[in-house]
Image (cartoon, rainbow, N blue to C red):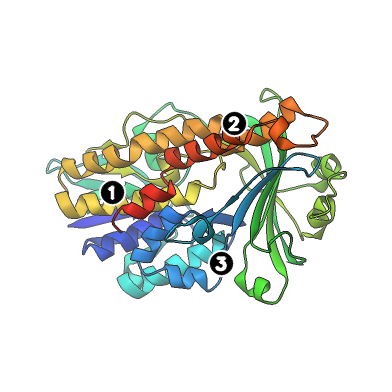
Amino acid sequence: MKVLIAGAGIGGLATALALHAKGVDCEVHELVSELRPLGVGINLLPHAVKVLTGLRIADRLDAVAIRTQELVYFNKHGQEIWREPRGLAAGYNWPQFSIHRGELQMILLGAVRERLGEARLHFGRRVVAVEETAGGRVRALFAGVDGADLGWREADLLIAADGIHSAVRAQLVPGEGAPKWNGAILWRAVTEDWAPFLTGRSMIMAGHQNQKFVCYPISRAAHERGRARLNWIAELRVDPSTPWRREDWNRPGKLEEFLPRFESWRFDWLDVPALIRGATGSYEFPMVDRDPLDRWSWGPVTLLGDAAHPMYPIGSNGASQAILDAAALARAIAANGTASSALQAYEAERRPPTSAIVLANRGNGPEQVMQLAEERAPAGFARIDDVVPRVELETIAAHYKRVAGFDPATLNATPA
């Protein structure tokens, strides 16, 4: 059996490791000529860390990442709305990790190199066309970074993990068009060597759906020195019909376009404008997703991760869901071989829950507690219970965990 994986992002590399663990021969093809530790911070939820523990990656993550202790929501005045423990502190059998995306990708890449060998990694090549052979296999046409024709390659299956702008998805779902923008712009950055806040392992979100600030530490080494490497996201929403630079997905940010809106956000637990100024630079991302599909597989070709279910970065789910995809697909292939039943089993397990998360995130997911506080008490409050009763907060938090698949009791009870 031979499997081709298009894309060496988190989903593609995790899939390679999961397939290798099941004894499936696979190789990875990546557009860029060299992977570098780029990006900003991300979170890995306990259900994804459970998978990575099974793949013998968790210890490597633990050496560099922060074990997130709590998640706290605040209003725009810095008043606490809701606080909940996370990871081990919440009773999970696995931690929640906050980590720099580049470090996570390099750890996964290192493991792929060790276990599959360098010969199974191909850089500077992208899939430009796929077709099913008469015998039910797949042929993929590759091109170089410069557009040079690199010829066809044949395999039993092709897994498209080539991101939100997936070339494979574009061929399989013609006419879908660009990702959908909801009017929100994210400015993301990392500020080095900062003073820790709250517990030192806290993740915070402040504001409401039209203006929000997210911040959390991502470095164990900095934490052990009594300092913090802080990942932050400043978010503003405009009318989606307003002209914006929607065609650019990784553009350097301009402070003058967002910092003035956060100048007054100086809380007794965090000075937001000072933190923003402390970063060497930021990157601007439109908040985009795509509508859920009614299928991911066409013959011997299937989608995975952001190619299958791109979602708004709400609830810390993007990378985690791609890792869950990898585990489910590897199990399905190990149990069913290359038969169509393998991809059917994979879709049956993963497509319904990820579609539900995409739609839940469009409704603000668990972050709707901030919007409720804004709508009901825009000038602030003396007691949050008078604005949003605790039972309502608890219900929102628990519901999202069930939708996203990390309800603690259920997750802890399922086999590894």
Judging by the rendered image, the residue that carries numbered circle 1 is 158
What amino acid type should be assigned to the residue bearing mark 2? Trp
Which of discs 1 and 2 lies nearer the camera? The answer is: 2
Q: Is residue 244 visible?
A: no
Vertical placement of residue 68 versus 266, above or below: below
**Residue at image x 81%, y 47%?**
255
Quadrant in which the N terminus is drawn = bottom left
Marks 2 and 3 sit apart, C-alpha to C-alpha, by 31 Å
Task: Please give left or right for residue 208 compared with residue 45 in the image.
Answer: right
Vertical placement of residue 138 versus 216, above or below: above
- Looking at the image, do the residues carrying marks 3 and 1 touch, with CB atoms under 8 Å apart? no
Which of discs 2 and 3 lies nearer the camera? The answer is: 3
Vertical placement of residue 401 versus 237, above or below: below
Q: Position of residue 179 (x, y in %)?
A: 53, 33
Vertical placement of residue 186 versus 103, above or below: above
Residue closer to the observer: 184 or 149: 184
Judging by the rendered image, the residue that carries numbered circle 3 is 65
**Residue at image x 44%, y 28%?**
176
Marks 3 and 1 sit apart, C-alpha to C-alpha, by 32 Å
Judging by the rendered image, the residue that carries numbered circle 2 is 181
Of pointers 2 and 3, the one earlier in the residue sequence: 3
Quadrant in which the C terminus is drawn = bottom left
Where disc 3 sits, the SS reads: loop
